[in-house]
Amino acid sequence: FFLAVSAGASLERLTTTPLFRAQMSESRPRKRGREGKDVPFDIESLNKFLGSEEEQLRNKAKEILDGDLIAHATAAAALDARVSAFASYQEALDDGFVADLQKQLMAVFRMGVKLESWLNTYTPPLASGGNVGVSGEVQDGVYAHIHGLSAGCSEALHRMLGYEKEYAVQRTKCTDERTWQRFRGTLEANMLHDLGKTTLQMHADLLNVANSISNNLSHLRTAASEESKLAAMY
């Protein structure tokens, strides 16, 4: 009897300690999710800012489509005509063609990014949760052409940098002059080929973007116009 009483008293003291109560509370099943209701955020300032930015993008887009896009396509065609006259990469470099091409690639890349931002002001594509309809599919197709133009210009600039780096590295490493001259001829031939490829691809991509926007601009819809259209239906 004495042992039983002692054991009961010890168990009672153990279960009343703060550590035991904390462990017991942690072992209890917890409710899933957060307690309380979600309160929507007030983002009126953000919506106003986005509205003003979208308006500026649309106003700027008209100048780009009716001016910059035509000018860049014309410049790309002129570069494509010039590159065929060079017999070597060094000749194109001395003529200033390489610098002109790099400048044009940078300008077209910036224009492409601006057009991507402008296109995103319309109803987003279906993959991004946009409304089901023609506008989302059209925007997705036009965006692919514009993004291909921007990515192509950026990749061309990186390729030109890679060729120049390879030229400098191998010129430093090659100690045998005959080996260097043989490698140099092959490398410069590839560099000249890449110049022609870049100008031709840039011109083709610019025309693809121009045709895509010209043929599908009437099918693009803003989010506000889609909401008003749905309201009229119901």
Image: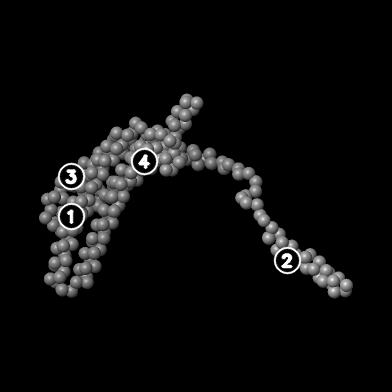
Q: CA distance from mark 1 to mark 3?
A: 17 Å
Q: CA distance from mark 3 to mark 2?
A: 82 Å
Residue 71 lies, in percent from the top left, at 24, 40
Residue at x 77%, y 65% (from the top left corner): 15
Helix, strand or loop status at disc 1: helix
| Label 1 – label 2 distance at C-alpha | 77 Å
Mark drawn on residue 78:
3
Is the image coloured rainbow, by chain, by secondary structure, or in one colour? one colour
Name the amino acid type tagged 1.
His
Identify the residue position indicated by label 1 in the image. 193
In this rendered view, identify the residue nearer to me: 9 or 196: 9
Work out whether mark 1 precedes mark 2 in sequence or the reverse, and give the earlier one: 2
* Mark in the foreground, 3 or 2: 2
The residue singled out by tag 4 in the image is 140
Quadrant where the N terminus lies? Answer: bottom right
Determine contact: label 4, label 3, CB under 8 Å. no
Query: Can see residue 69?
Result: no
Q: Residue at x 34, y 42 (%)?
A: 143
Q: Toward which corner of the image does residue 51 lie, by quadrant?
A: top left
Mark 3: amino acid: Ala
Within-10-Å neighbours for mark 1: few <14, some 14–19, many 20+: some
